[in-house]
Image (spheres, coloured by chain):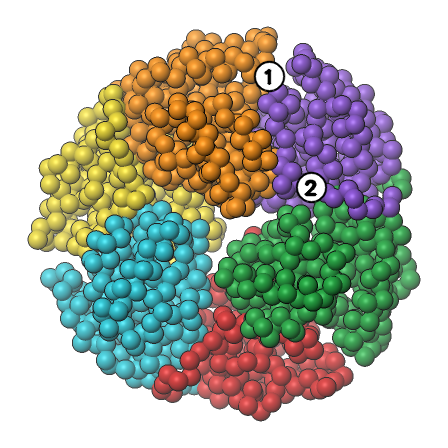
Chain colours: A cyan, B red, C green, D purple, E yellow, F orange
Amino acid sequence: MTRLIKIVIPVATSIWNEKVKEFCEKIREPDTSISVVNLEKGPESIESYYDEAFASPYVALEAIKAEKEGYNAVIVYCFGNPGVNAARAAVKIPVFGAGEVGITFANLLGNRFSIISTLEVAVPRCLRTVKLLDMESKLASIRTVNMPVLELESKDKLLKAALDAGQLAIEDGADVIVLGCTCMTGIRNHLEEKLGIPVIDPGEATLKFAEVAVSLNLKHSKRYFRHNFKKKTIL
Amino acid sequence: MTRLIKIVIPVATSIWNEKVKEFCEKIREPDTSISVVNLEKGPESIESYYDEAFASPYVALEAIKAEKEGYNAVIVYCFGNPGVNAARAAVKIPVFGAGEVGITFANLLGNRFSIISTLEVAVPRCLRTVKLLDMESKLASIRTVNMPVLELESKDKLLKAALDAGQLAIEDGADVIVLGCTCMTGIRNHLEEKLGIPVIDPGEATLKFAEVAVSLNLKHSKRYFRHNFKKKTIL
Amino acid sequence: MTRLIKIVIPVATSIWNEKVKEFCEKIREPDTSISVVNLEKGPESIESYYDEAFASPYVALEAIKAEKEGYNAVIVYCFGNPGVNAARAAVKIPVFGAGEVGITFANLLGNRFSIISTLEVAVPRCLRTVKLLDMESKLASIRTVNMPVLELESKDKLLKAALDAGQLAIEDGADVIVLGCTCMTGIRNHLEEKLGIPVIDPGEATLKFAEVAVSLNLKHSKRYFRHNFKKKTIL
Amino acid sequence: MTRLIKIVIPVATSIWNEKVKEFCEKIREPDTSISVVNLEKGPESIESYYDEAFASPYVALEAIKAEKEGYNAVIVYCFGNPGVNAARAAVKIPVFGAGEVGITFANLLGNRFSIISTLEVAVPRCLRTVKLLDMESKLASIRTVNMPVLELESKDKLLKAALDAGQLAIEDGADVIVLGCTCMTGIRNHLEEKLGIPVIDPGEATLKFAEVAVSLNLKHSKRYFRHNFKKKTIL
Amino acid sequence: MTRLIKIVIPVATSIWNEKVKEFCEKIREPDTSISVVNLEKGPESIESYYDEAFASPYVALEAIKAEKEGYNAVIVYCFGNPGVNAARAAVKIPVFGAGEVGITFANLLGNRFSIISTLEVAVPRCLRTVKLLDMESKLASIRTVNMPVLELESKDKLLKAALDAGQLAIEDGADVIVLGCTCMTGIRNHLEEKLGIPVIDPGEATLKFAEVAVSLNLKHSKRYFRHNFKKKTIL
Amino acid sequence: MTRLIKIVIPVATSIWNEKVKEFCEKIREPDTSISVVNLEKGPESIESYYDEAFASPYVALEAIKAEKEGYNAVIVYCFGNPGVNAARAAVKIPVFGAGEVGITFANLLGNRFSIISTLEVAVPRCLRTVKLLDMESKLASIRTVNMPVLELESKDKLLKAALDAGQLAIEDGADVIVLGCTCMTGIRNHLEEKLGIPVIDPGEATLKFAEVAVSLNLKHSKRYFRHNFKKKTIL
C-alpha cells in the first residue's frame, strides 16, 4: 500500500513549497508519496491570531479537496496549527498540525521542554497550543530567535540565534527543545550537537507521525470533530 | 460621553439582528448607543470548529470597520467567541466574546458552574473556552438541550429542555448556570426561579461588561494581541 | 431605577472614606447612588491573615445592615476581600470584594497578569485569592512597592515604586497589571501610559461590576453561600 | 521534656470540652499534657463562612494567650480550621487545624480520598481547604451524613449515615476516608472494619501531629505567617 | 538503513513472545528488523507495584544488552512501562514503554480518552502513568474488563468485556479509547467499528513510534535520564 | 504497647546503619523500639532511576520480612522512596518513604517549599515525587549542594553548600526548606537559624510519622496497594 500524504503550507505564497518538498522527500518511508501545496488566499506567514483566522478556512477547504483526491492524510505544515480543528471537523482522513505533533513528541523524550519561537508576537499562540494539549507543567520556557518567519532563510543568523535561545532554555530547565517554526529546517542536528539535548523539528516529526497514522489506520475522533454539512456556509 | 458599541452577530444571516437589538436596548445604560450587524459571509450558525473558522476572518474585518467608524467597543455576540482573538489583534478598541465574559462572571457568583449548551457537537468548543480561561476546576458539567441553534426560537421547548438540563447540572454539583448560547435569550428569569441558583445570560453579561470597559477605558493588552499589518493578506 | 450601593472600607478608621467617595462618585453611572462607610471595630489596615480575621465579622455585620437599609449591593473595598464570603452567607444582595473582581477582569484583557502589592507580608493572601479563583496559571508574578498601606498617600513615591514594579512584572511575562491595593487610586492612567499595557484599579472595577450586577439582578449563589441564622452567635 | 498542648474548640459553648479532653487523653504520648478550652464568644458550631468569620478572631486571641502561658503548640479542634492562619500570624508556637492535618494524612495512606462531611452547607469550605492544600486531584468526593454538628452525638444514627456515605465514597473511587468533622469521634474503627479502607479521624491525627511538631521543634514559617503588632486593632 | 528494534516483554515467561513477534512483523516497515525477548527473572505478569519492582531491574539489563548488541531502539512491551526510566538512564539508544506511547497518541486524535484496563488492581498504576505524562485532565475514565492478564487469550470473552467497558467509557465522555494492556491485541478493529471512536493499541503504536524515533534519530534526553556507572551495584 | 519500627536503608552498604540508628534513637518516643538494616543487594546509593530499580525489589523483600518478624511499621530511609509502593503492595503494616513524608510535612508549615537535593542527576526523581503527591504548585524550586551522597559526610562542606542553596531557595520564593537526602542529617538546626525559615529533615519526620501511624493504627489502603501472591515471581 502506498501512503498518500498531502502537505498544506498554510500561507498564500509558494516560496516554501519546493524546499519543504525536498526536505520531506528525504525522510519519508519508501512507500509514501507526498505532495506539497500552499493556500490560494490567506496570510503571507502565520504569526498572529489575525493570520491564523485568515488561513483557517482555506486550510479546511484544502483538506476537503485532499480527501476527495484520495489522500490518506493531511499535514498542516505550520507550528501554529491554523485550521487543523476545522479541517478535522470537515473530513474523515487524519489531519495533523506540526505544532501539536512536535510538542507531543517532547513528552516521550524528556521531562521538560522549551520552544524556540520566532518573534514575541508568536508566543501567545504557542502558549495556547501547549495549554490545549495540557502540557503546561512540562513547559520550561518559550524563547525566541527574534526573527520574523520571512527572514529565517538566513541560516547562519538563525543558527546563532537558536543556539543562544537554546542555551537560555537549558538554564530555564529544559531537557528537550522543540523548534517553534516549521521554517527552522536544517538546524536540528547542529543544535543537538552543541546543546547536548534532543531537538525536535516539528515538520519532520509530523510527516513521520502521519505515516504511522496511515499505517495503523488511526483517525481523529468523529465524536469530537464533526460538522453538519447540511447547514449553509457562504464563502 | 456616549458609549458606542457595535454588536457583531457572527453568522451570515440577519434573522437574529432585530431580536438582539431589541433585547440589548432594554438593558443598556441610558448613554450607550448600540448597533447590531451580522456577517456578510460565513456560516449560518456557530456549532463546530468548521463554523468557527469560516466566521473568524469576517469578524475581524467587522471589528476593523467598527474601529474606523468610531465605535468604542465590539461585542462578538456568540458563546463560541469566533474571531475574538483575531479581532483583538487587529484593533485597539476592546473586543469581547459572549462566551468568555459569561463564563468569567460565574467565578464571581458561586463556586462551580455548569454550561447549558445546544448540541453535543458544540461541547468540545465550550470545553476549550473554559480551559483557555483556566476555569476547568470550576466547571461542574456541560449539559445540552439537544436543540440546534436554529430551533431555539421555540421558547416552550427550550425552556423545558433547559430546566431538565439545569436540574442535572445541580446534581452534577453546579451552583451557578451559564447559558451556552446567546440565542437562549429570555429564559433566564424563569430558570432562576425554578432552579434556585443564579443563571447567567452571556449576551446581556457581555453588553454590560463592554459598557464597563468603555467607561473605565479598559482595553485588551496590545502586548498580547497584536498583528503586523505591513504583511500582506490575500482575501 | 436607582442602584443603591454601599461601599464598606473594611478598616476601623475613617481616613479613607472621603477620598473613596470622591473617587467613586466620578465613575458611577448617573442613576447609581453610593455611600461609603468604614468599620466600627477591626484593624487599621488589611495586610495579614490576622487583620483579615479581625475585620471579617464586622464586614458581615455591615452587609446585614446594608441589606436591611435597602441597598442593592455591597462592595468590600479592599484587595484582600476580608469577610466577603461571610457577608455573602449572611445576605441575599450581592457582595463583591475588590480583589476578586480586579483579578477576574484580567482574564478578559490579556493572557498573564501581575499584581503590584504593598508589602511582602501581603503577598501570601494575594496568592490565596488567585488560587481560589483558579487563576494561578495566569499569574505572571506578584511584585511589591514595599510601602505599607498607610503610606500610600505619598503619590509621587508610590508612582515611582509602582512603575519599577510594573517594569519587573513585564519582564516576568505580564501583559496586564492589577493594582494590589484599593488605596493605589489615581495612578492607573500614568502607569498605563508608561508601561504600555492595561492596568486594572480594583476599586473602580468593582464599583462598575456591582452596577452591572444590580442592573442584571445577578446575585451570588445561595446554594453555595448560606448560613443558618437559627443558630446562636455570641458577639 | 513535657509537651504542653492547648486544644481550642472554636465555638462559644463548652459542651464538647470534656468529651474531647477524654478522647485526647487516651491517645496522647505519656509526656504530653493537654488542656482543652472553648471560645468565650463566637458561633455555636462551625458550618458556614459566617460561623468561620465570627470564630476566627477569638481563635487568634486564644493562641496569643496560649503562647504567653507557655504552651508549646495550639490545636484548632475543628475540620473547618477557623482562625488558623490568623493565629499563625500572631504567634511563634505552631498552630494546627484539624482539617488541614486530617486531609494531609490522606496523601500518605492511599491514592484518592473522600471526605464525609456533616451538611451540604459545609461542603464549600471543605472544598476550599482541599484546594488551598493543592490536593484537589486527590479528592474523590465529598459525601455528607446530612446531620448538623449539634446532632452528631446520636452515635447510632451517625454510624449508619457515615457507613452509607462511605460506601458511596468507595463507588466514587475513594481508597481513604477522612471524617469531615472533629465531632465524628468514636466511629473510625467501626467504619474501617465495615468499609475495608483506612479512615482518618482529624482530631486524633492533629493531636499526634502536634506532638511530632513539638518533639522536632517544627514551627510554621514566619516568612509566610506574620503580622505587624505595631498597628492598632480595635476589638 | 535497517532499523533494529528489540522488543522486551517484561515478564519471566515466554508464552507471549511468538504472538507478539507475529503481530509486530505484520505492521513493521519493510526495512525494520525486530526481535522479541522476555525476562529471565521477574513476575509472570505486570499488574501491581510489586510486579513492577521485580521486573524493572531485568528490563534495564535487557536494554544494556540490546545496546551492546547494536539495536537502535528498545520497546518495553507492557502498558505498565516497568523499568523504562531505569533503562533510559542506562543506555543511549531510545527506550519506549507501550503505556506512555499509547496514552500520548490519544492527545492527537481527540479530546478525552478512556483506558480499558484489566483488573482493578492495575488501575492505580494507570493513573500514575497518566499523571506523570500530565494528561489527567484529558482522562475521561479508566474502565476494566475484569480479567487478569493471563486470561486475556480468551478472545471472545475479552471482546465482549471490552465492548461493555468501551460503552461505559463513552458515557464517561471519552472520544478515544486506549487499550490498557499490550495483551489485548487483535480486538482494536472490531471495537472501533462497534464503538465508532478511535481505539489505540499501545503495542502497535509503540512499534511504529520506535521506528519513527530511529528514522529521525530521536533519543531521550541524557540531561534527564542518566546514571553514574562508576558506582557499584550488587546484583 | 511498644512500637516496633524497622528502618530500611535501601542501599547495599552498611556504612550508614550506625549513624542512622544513633540519630533515630535520640528522637524516638520512649516506648518505640527501632532496628536499622541495609539491603543485601542493590546500589551503593540512590541517585538515578537505575539505582531505584535495583533497590526496589530488595526493599519489598525487607518489608515482607519485617512483617513476618512482627514489626509494626517499615521506614524506607531515603528521600527517593525506592520500593515504597512495591512494599505497600506486599504487606499490611504501614510503609513510609522519607521523601513522601518530608515533602508532605511542608504543606503544614508554610506556603511554598524548596528541596535541597544532592546532584542534578537526582532532581528528576524529586520532581516526580512532588508531582505524584500533587504538590507541584507548592514547590518553589529544587536546589542542589552539588555533592554526591557518598561525600555528604563532609559536614562543613555540606553545611556551607546547603546554606548557599537555601539562600537561593528563599530568592525563589520558598518559605520552607525540605532537605532532599536522608544523609543530610545534623544540619537542620544550623540552617534554620541562619535562614530564618523552617527546615524539614525527612528522616526524622518519617520516624515520628511512623510512630503516629502505629499509635493510631493507620495503615495504607489495601484497596490501592495490593498484590496477588498466587502469581509466581522468579527472583
- The residue sitting at 59% across, 55% down in the picture is C142
Q: Is residue E166 visible?
A: no
Q: Chain of mark 1?
A: F
> Label 1, on which residue?
F215
Question: Vertically, is E185 above or below E231?
Answer: below
- Relative placement, left or right, of E34 versus C62 is left
Residue E203 or residue A16, whichever sits in front = A16
Question: Vertically, is F5 above or below B127?
Answer: above
- The residue sitting at 65% across, 86% down in the picture is B4
* Quarter assignment of residue B21: bottom right
Question: Vertically, is B93 above or below C51?
Answer: below
Question: Which disc number belongs to residue D226?
Answer: 2
Q: Are marks 2 and 1 in contact (CB under 8 Å)?
A: no
Q: Amino acid at mark 2?
A: Arg
Classify the position of the C terminus of chain D by image quarter. Answer: top right
Residue C170 or residue D117, whichever sits in front = C170
Q: Chain of mark 2?
A: D
Residue D141 or residue F142, whichever sits in front = F142
Is the residue marked by circle 1 packed among few (<14), some (14-19), or many (20+) residues within 10 Å?
some
- The residue sitting at 22% across, 63% down in the picture is A187
* Quarter assignment of residue A166: bottom left
Is the residue marked by circle 2 packed among few (<14), some (14-19), or many (20+) residues within 10 Å?
many
Q: Position of residue A83 (x, y in %)?
A: 37, 72
Do the dots labelled 2 and 1 sit on one chain? no
